[in-house]
Amino acid sequence: MRALLQRVAYAKVKTKDGFYSAIQSGILVFVGFEETDNTQDLLLIKNKIFNLRIFKNTEGKLHFSVTDTQAEIMIVSQFTLFADSWQGNRPSFTRAAKPEQAHMLYNQFCTLCQSMPNTCYTGSFGSDMQVELINDGPLTLWLDSKSR
């Protein structure tokens, strides 16, 4: 499992039907899954997201976690996190989980995150979305459950 975290001042997701969800100050998490991912991968990434100290204290040091601050979270599926773009000029997505498996893992991951006290919103799995955001920092982190 891979996750790209961005600390945001604001994030909004729209689909072809219009507004879908939005958060204020918090983190936007793009997640992608591969065939070998399981519950352990989901828990590892969830725990990291909720415990990384990525919010500043009064001295400007990264000191507080999502859990500490009760920051809002938005989770958006993005299979392109498993793109292989080194051969040729067209990315290959063969490492990404098949849609049925990825949808199941995405729902399971969102449920794990929504069990936490933070307000957690999602994107629309498998939809063509427009994601609008204002980075805060910017602070962007890459998590890969297989790179421990």
Image (cartoon, rainbow, N blue to C red):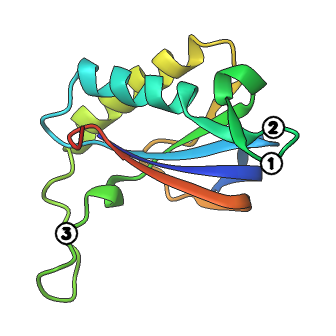
**Marks 1 and 2 close (CB-CB < 8 Å):** yes
- Point 69% across, 34% down: residue: 63
The residue beneath circle 2 is 57
- Neighbor class of circle 3 (other Cα within 10 Å; few <14, some 14-19, many 20+) is some
The residue beneath circle 1 is 60
Give whichever of 141, 104 is nearer the camera: 141
- Point 21% across, 24% down: residue: 38
Please indicate whether residue 27 sits to the left or right of residue 106 in the image.
right
Above-or-below relation of 119 to 99: above
- Point 14% across, 39% down: residue: 35
- Neighbor class of circle 2 (other Cα within 10 Å; few <14, some 14-19, many 20+) is few
Give, as a three-letter code, the residue at label 3. Asp
Tag 3 or tag 1, which sits nearer the N-term? 1
Quadrant for the N terminus, please: top left
Q: CA distance from mark 1 to mark 3?
A: 37 Å
- Neighbor class of circle 1 (other Cα within 10 Å; few <14, some 14-19, many 20+) is few
Query: Circle 2 sits in a helix, a strand or a loop, which is it?
Result: loop
Q: Residue 107 falls in which quadrant of the image? A: top left
Q: Position of residue 2 (x, y in %)?
A: 33, 45
Q: Is residue 17 visible?
A: no
Q: Position of residue 75 (x, y in %)?
A: 55, 39
Residue extending furthest right?
58
Give, as a three-letter code, the residue at label 1. Gly
Tag 2 or tag 3, which sits nearer the N-term? 2
